[in-house]
Each structure stands twice: as structure tokens, then as C-alpha cells.
Amino acid sequence: MKTIVDWLVPRAHAAINFNFLTPVQNSENNVSTIANNVINFVLIIAGIMAIVYLIYSGILYITAAGNPDAAKKGQQGVINAIIGIVIIVLAYFIARSIAGIGKGMV
């Protein structure tokens, strides 16, 4: 008798589509593709962390309740988070422009 697990496992496995052991079709762009994926992943994680820090600092600033030390800490955190987001966006555009220049050289 088949259970729901026996029915779901092959379908879940097919949906994931494991292609780790198949040979790479286009080996010229393999290194650049991996580098682009790593850069995108790192920048996305950094962006998420900066937005979480911005939200945390904003809440800290709002809930300072007249405490000047907590308000200053929250305000400085908001400023630092915004600077971080600007740096992350600039890093993204610099990485894209370098990747574009590199594609023209191949």
C-alpha cells in the first residue's frame, strides 16, 4: 500500500532538479557565472542585514522615550545602516560594470 510519502518524495525530488553531477556545457563562462552568483548572494545577504539593522535602529530610536543616550544610539544606527545600504548598492553597480567589462574581453 502506497503512502503519501511514497507519492510525494519522487515528485519533490524531480521538482528540485539536482544537476550537480552533470558536466558543464559552457566551460568558458563557468568561472564568471560562479563569481556572479557568489557576488549576488553576498550582496543580497548584506542588503538584508542592513535593512534589518535599519529597522532595529529605527525601533530603538522610536522607543527611546526621552532617554538621550538611547536616542543617540538609535539615530547613529539609522545613519550607519543608510550608509551601509548606499555602499552595498554601489558595490552592486561596480560589480556589474566590472562583469560587463570582463565579458567584452573574452
Image (cartoon, helix red, strand yellow):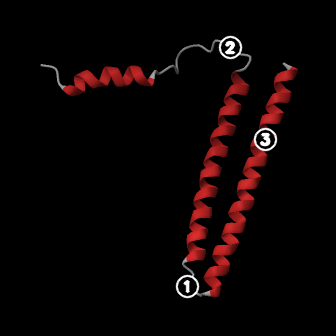
* Image mark for residue 26: 2
Estimate the x, y position of residue 8 in percent, counting from the top left: 28, 25
Q: Are marks 3 and 1 in contact (CB under 8 Å)?
A: no
Q: Secondary structure at mark 3?
A: helix
Viewer-nearest residue: 57 or 3? 57
48 sits left or right of 6 in the view = right
Mark toward the start of the polypeptide (2 vs 3)? 2
Pick the quarter of the image with the C terminus: top right
Residue denoted by label 3: 93
Q: Is residue 70 placed above or below 21 in the rendered structure? A: below
Separation of residues labelled 2 and 3 (CA atoms): 25 Å
Mark toward the start of the polypeptide (1 vs 2)? 2
Residue denoted by label 1: 65
**Residue at image coords 78%, 35%:** 96
The amino acid type of the residue labelled 1 equals Ala
Viewer-nearest residue: 20 or 5? 5
9 sits left or right of 35 in the view = left
The amino acid type of the residue labelled 2 equals Asn
Image quarter of residue 101: top right
